[in-house]
Image (cartoon, rainbow, N blue to C red):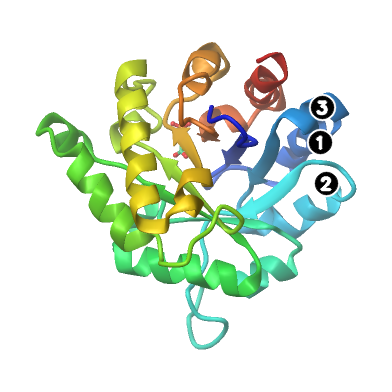
Amino acid sequence: MTPDIIPLVAGNWKMNGARDQLDQLALMSQGLDDDLADAVDVVVCPPTTLLYVATTLSEDTPLQVGAQDCHNEQSGAHTGDISAEMIKDCLADYCIVGHSERRTDHGESDYHVAGKAQACWRAGLTAIICIGETEAEYDAGMAQAVLKRQILSSVPEGATEDDTIVAYEPVWAIGTGKTPSPEDIRDIHAFIRETLAEKLGGHGERMRILYGGSVKPANAAELMSILNVDGALVGGASLKAEDFLAICEIYRDM
Ligand code: PGA
């Protein structure tokens, strides 16, 4: 945690969930009582097919909704793509950009990611910009150099704590059950904070930095108590309301 920063837990459903998965979303919104909603901001990012129904279901509850990717342009000849404006039109408020699965599966570069983040701002969405090193880069001691490059090139100038969140997800920790040691996470998040502050001044000091990669109820309390870890980006454990709420509830008890 960082003093004076309200933490945020975001669930990334990835390419999982048909309409019956909305039962879990309804349970999540019901489980967010006033105490919990005061302690932590909670966002679920379902697949685009469920986006509009998800925002409708969570209307008038503290549960917020986001998308998992957007195109950088507003409209046009881009078959299969979705613009930030379309996401906003579905009444969502957030969009993940630059997830490592998009960087790998779709060859998205830092440059693409920065364009998508700016598209989010243009549409009035908060961008959740993902960064993270691969296992080979980690083993070679290059994690900080990779993260610095990603921050300098994927987080556009002018980013503020109101329109941007940074999520650190070591690629080797995603969906593997492995996480870096708490000491490693502390050092890396301190480095990310320092780099954001150098780039963005006070905005970088106040920006939320999430940790992602195999966060689950069993390890969340330890991970979330680390300085400069201002919440979590949760994949697998966000599919079940019980697990996802258990992660959020850590903040009520802190
Ligand atoms: P995981 O995924 O929690 O299943 O490791 C995290 C993510 O990719 O956002």
Q: Quadrant of residue 138?
A: top left
Q: Is residue 134 above or below residue 220?
A: below
- Tell me what residue is drawn at x 31 percent, y 27 percent: 187
Residue type (three-letter) at the residue carrying disc 2: Ser
Q: Label 2 near label 1: C-beta < 8 Å?
A: yes
Q: Quadrant of residue 248?
A: top right
- Tell me what residue is drawn at x 70 percent, y 14 percent: 253
As helix, strand or loop, the secondary structure at mark 1 comes to helix
Looking at the image, residue 95 sits to the left or right of residue 246; the answer is left
Q: Label 3 near label 2: C-beta < 8 Å?
A: no
As helix, strand or loop, the secondary structure at mark 3 comes to helix
- Tell me what residue is drawn at x 41 percent, y 67 percent: 157
The numbered mark at residue 58 is 2
Mark closest to the chain's N terminus, 2 or 3: 3
- Tell me what residue is drawn at x 40 percent, y 66 percent: 114
The numbered mark at residue 115 is none
Give the CA distance from mark 3 to mark 1: 5 Å
